[in-house]
Image: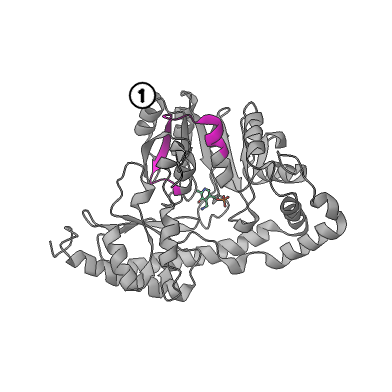
Amino acid sequence: MPAFAKRMSQVRRSFIREILKVTADPSIISFAGGLPKPDLFPTGPIAAAAARVLAENGPAALQYSVTEGEPALRQWIADRYKTKRGLDIDPATILITNGSQQSLDLLGKVFLDPGDVVGVELPGYIGAIQAFSVFEPTFAGVPLGPEGPDIDRLVDVLTRQQAKMFYAVPNFQNPSGLTYSLTARRAVAEAMRVSDAIFVEDDPYGELRFMGEALPPVSAFMTQDRYLLGTFSKIAAPGLRLGWVVADPDSLPKLVTAKQASDLHCSTLVQRILVQYLADNDLDAHIATIKAAYGAQRDLMVERIKAEFPEGVQYTEPEGGMFLWVTLPEGCSAFALFDLCIKEKVAFVPGEPFFVDGSGQRTMRLNFSNAEPERIVEGIRRMGRAIEKLLETPACPAGPGA
Ligand code: PMP
């Protein structure tokens, strides 16, 4: 074995990728992945955009380009913040990245030294925990409830523990599906204002709202130390690998340097294809199609859970996004349920790996964006059966068998 760098010792392999290996078997109904629905990808329009870019602008589209990203794409993103959110964003503060995952990596590179405290939600997005882990921080969990994060705990993490960063997903969070209320958004912004930490607001799902009213990003209530991440993965296609970070103007050059060191710039060709696609098509109409499909699947999953899951099992009813979150009765193990579910040929992601404090044993994440309606009905029926069985085992002290 070669001597790997110390920094890799704390980085866990993605647990979800391990589960996805088990669920590759097509006879397993899987709610484990986090994938968008592929038949909704704009394949034809992207093919047309690619043909146009290459025919009209071939050599320039195949050339190296600037690290910050294609100017037309940065402008499009700034314009959209204005029209959709009423936010004035200077395109010069936008850095195009290889998906939001790269924004997380670059923020870690630029801001985190070993031992720095990073506040993350409990549960928190596992990909961010993995990205930041490379920089050897100490994670401090901030419990998430139906209205948003525990503000007292957040203040404690920011002040007493002097966190360097708080990372949050305020819209239809991955994994919980929870959304911060307006009051919580203001409270988080205020807590950030009086601290020295930076706020990293990751918003891949904000445009996928099926019901209720859109809320402004937390960053809208802040004037500095805010980093707002976006991506085309959930509104166009993840294979494009294009996202962005709106950075504090003073820090943008550092992020640009970090990106230069990593990969020089995002693919010129793919950025131009996306710009062409956005110019020639109505993205809002496309997003409306995605929302109609995911919204119907979410409704079906919630309805079947109500009908099939035994009493005492709690679940979120997300207003958007791709996930819902289930909590088993006290004392039950989601890993034990996972084993029973695999026997029933249905899969989900146990929640524990999403908790930096090692809690969350009785929680789990279910994805509703990727399964066909018939498979949702059958999969939730199988899960309901497996939960009944779990409740009868002594492993689950809350059950009648205890
Ligand atoms: N942040 C969150 C909260 C996500 O759920 C995901 C995708 N699973 C990402 C970031 C990464 O997305 P991208 O494809 O833009 O890298």
Residue, far right: 56
Indicate the position of residue 277 as horizontal and vertical percent values. Answer: 74, 57
Magenta-highlighted residues: 106-126
Q: Residue at x 47, y 55 (%)?
A: 319
Q: Residue at x 47, y 41 (%)?
A: 168
Horizontal relation, residue 25 to residue 94: left or right: left
Q: Is residue 370 visible?
A: yes
Indicate the position of residue 335 as horizontal and vertical percent values. Answer: 29, 59
Indicate the position of residue 320 as horizontal and vertical percent values. Answer: 50, 55
- Classify 10 Å Cα crowding around label 1: few (below 14), some (14-19), many (20 and above): few
Indicate the position of residue 178 as horizontal and vertical percent values. Answer: 43, 49
300 or 30: nearer the viewer: 30
Residue at the disc numbered 1 = 160
Horizontal relation, residue 313 to residue 398: left or right: right
Which quadrant: the C terminus? bottom left
265 lies above or below 309: above
User: Assess mark 1: CB under 8 A from ligand 1?
Assistant: no
